């Protein structure tokens, strides 16, 4: 059957609301993309080399795609996960596996994104299936050989104005420096400070801290030197355009330690003798320290906690991290963040964006926090919640308590480069649909809805992420 995209996809079913949503969507459809949280490798844009093959681009590195196929019995080996550049036979094998299991994506956001990528970017006119797999593969492979489908050309075509990456504190940020110095490159590609591994004592932590010290040219053999090294690397990131620091831990506890106790645990952790409880206490103390540093240097602090990373250890050992088996945990923000917010919640210029994979806390905790503290913003649904129904629930859960202005704007949180425009388009359609319903219920005038729709795309991310 032919593959096509309905112009009213995701808009309200009710005719009057749909008519309003169409008008709102027309106003935001072609606005530039601001992507303040993502995982695209900046070297992709520096090198600007043609993409190797359709499977490497659209399947193997996208854990949204591979996890569902894996659940349906397709091995990660067959999908090319962790195998680097794929040969022609490997790439076709992965592509056939996806197309042959296309029904696995029905009703999922992956289906929505992939439909948009295939149709709007590559001009595919057939629905993926076992019988169409090779023809679709050949169509995309031919496109990828054209100059218009190299990374920089697609970046411009997608209308991306700002793209934030996620980077290790010890990274020299050479790729960002190269882009900033390139007179032909006009978009902003910003690094994001991601210090998780340096805040959580455990296996390999002493070596990681040593690398941090080398990058900062600072002796990290004691706690004071460690703090100075973190502060130095944050300044390095700011000098290269960073506006935010990103944190993901099992919880967001922020209980402080005394300086002496923090120094004692730090020494024990370097020696490998700190207990698990001491490691957790140190990490929670350091999250509080990260807030202090954000108040000092202005980096936005984003939190997206409560994920059990690498849930299936055999898969992690064989294929590495970020291969589809990170699983959400319950989250608690109100009490966990109280020490941090007691100290810094009303500090001028401090921004704290709260994301979650546990949507039960949107109404109960995140919206009330964002509805009081001037520093707190409710982060958009992401990861397992970046789906149409979950995004609609988010708007209903948060808006009544925190309004629209206290939300972050959409984040795509993706390594899948070609899915960026599809993800942002989905968010714009859903927000326009929600606003149209408010107009239809006579809770907003249409001019207010129009202004809000534009703000959600342009003003909110700039304000929350200090873009």
Image (spheres, grey):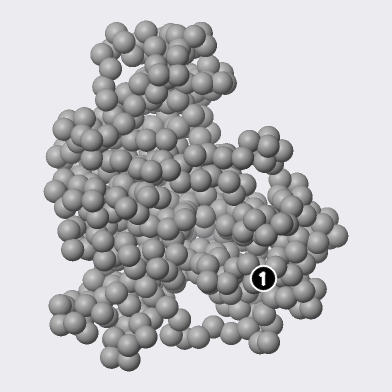
Give the image location of residue 307, x and y in percent: 46, 42
Corner quadrant of residue 338: top left
User: Which quadrant holds the N terminus?
Assistant: bottom right
Give the image location of residue 258, x and y in percent: 25, 13
In the depicted structure, whether residue 443 falls above or below residue 366: below
In the depicted structure, whether residue 388 falls above or below residue 119: above
> Could you tell me which residue is drawn at 45 percent across and 12 percent down?
274
**Residue 56 in sight here:** no
Residue corresponding to mark 1: 102
Please identify the residue farthest to the right as the structure is shown. 89
> Could you tell me which residue is drawn at 28 percent across and 12 percent down?
259
> Left of 224 or right of it: where is 140?
right
Corner quadrant of residue 147: bottom right
> Could you tell me which residue is drawn at 40 percent across and 50 percent down?
357
Corner quadrant of residue 154: bottom right
> Left of 26 or right of it: where is 3?
right
**Residue 337 in sight here:** yes
Give the image location of residue 366, x and y in percent: 25, 49
Element class at badge 1? helix
């Amino acid at each position: 059957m032919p593959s096509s995209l309905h112009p009213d996809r995701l808009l309200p079913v009710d005719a009057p609301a749909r008519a309003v949503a169409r008008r709102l969507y027309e106003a935001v459809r072609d606005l530039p993309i601001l992507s303040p949280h993502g995982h695209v490798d900046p070297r992709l844009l520096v090198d600007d080399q043609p993409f190797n093959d359709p499977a490497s681009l659209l399947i193997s590195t996208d854990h949204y795609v591979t996890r569902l196929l894996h659940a349906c019995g397709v091995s990660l080996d067959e999908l090319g996960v962790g195998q680097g550049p794929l040969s022609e036979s490997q790439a076709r094998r992965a592509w056939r596996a996806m197309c042959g299991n296309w029904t696995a994506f029905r009703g999922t956001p992956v289906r929505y994104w992939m439909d948009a990528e295939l149709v709007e970017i590559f001009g595919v006119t057939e629905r993926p299936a076992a019988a169409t797999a090779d023809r679709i593969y050949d169509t995309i492979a031919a496109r990828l050989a054209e100059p218009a489908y190299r990374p920089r050309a697609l970046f411009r075509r997608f209308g991306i104005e700002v793209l934030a990456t996620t980077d290790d504190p010890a990274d020299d940020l050479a790729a960002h420096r190269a882009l900033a110095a390139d007179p032909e490159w006009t978009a902003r590609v910003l690094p994001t400070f991601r210090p998780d591994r340096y805040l959580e004592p455990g296996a390999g932590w002493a070596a990681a801290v040593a690398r941090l010290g080398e990058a900062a040219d600072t002796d990290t053999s004691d706690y004071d030197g460690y703090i100075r090294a973190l502060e130095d690397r944050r300044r390095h990131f700011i000098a290269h355009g960073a506006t935010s620091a990103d944190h993901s831990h099992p919880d967001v506890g922020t209980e402080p330690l005394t300086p002496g106790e923090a120094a004692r645990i730090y020494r024990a952790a370097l020696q490998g003798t700190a207990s698990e409880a001491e490691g957790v206490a140190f990490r929670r103390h350091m999250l509080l320290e990260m807030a202090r540093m954000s108040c000092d240097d202005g980096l936005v602090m984003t939190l997206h906690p409560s994920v059990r990373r690498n849930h299936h250890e055999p898969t992690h050992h064989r294929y590495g991290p970020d291969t589809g088996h990170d699983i959400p945990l319950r989250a608690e923000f109100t009490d966990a963040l109280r020490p941090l917010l007691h100290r810094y919640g009303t500090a001028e210029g401090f921004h704290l964006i709260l994301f979650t994979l546990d949507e039960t806390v949107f109404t109960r905790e995140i919206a009330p926090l964002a509805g009081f503290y001037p520093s707190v913003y409710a982060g958009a649904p992401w990861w397992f919640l970046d789906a149409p129904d979950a995004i609609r629930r988010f708007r209903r859960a948060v808006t009544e308590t925190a309004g629209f202005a206290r939300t972050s704007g959409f984040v795509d949180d993706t390594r899948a480069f070609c899915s960026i425009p599809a993800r942002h388009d989905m968010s714009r359609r859903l927000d326009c649909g929600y606003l149209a319903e408010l107009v239809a219920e006579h809770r907003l005038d249409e001019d207010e809805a129009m202004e809000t729709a534009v703000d959600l795309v342009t003003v909110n991310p700039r304000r929350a992420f200090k873009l």
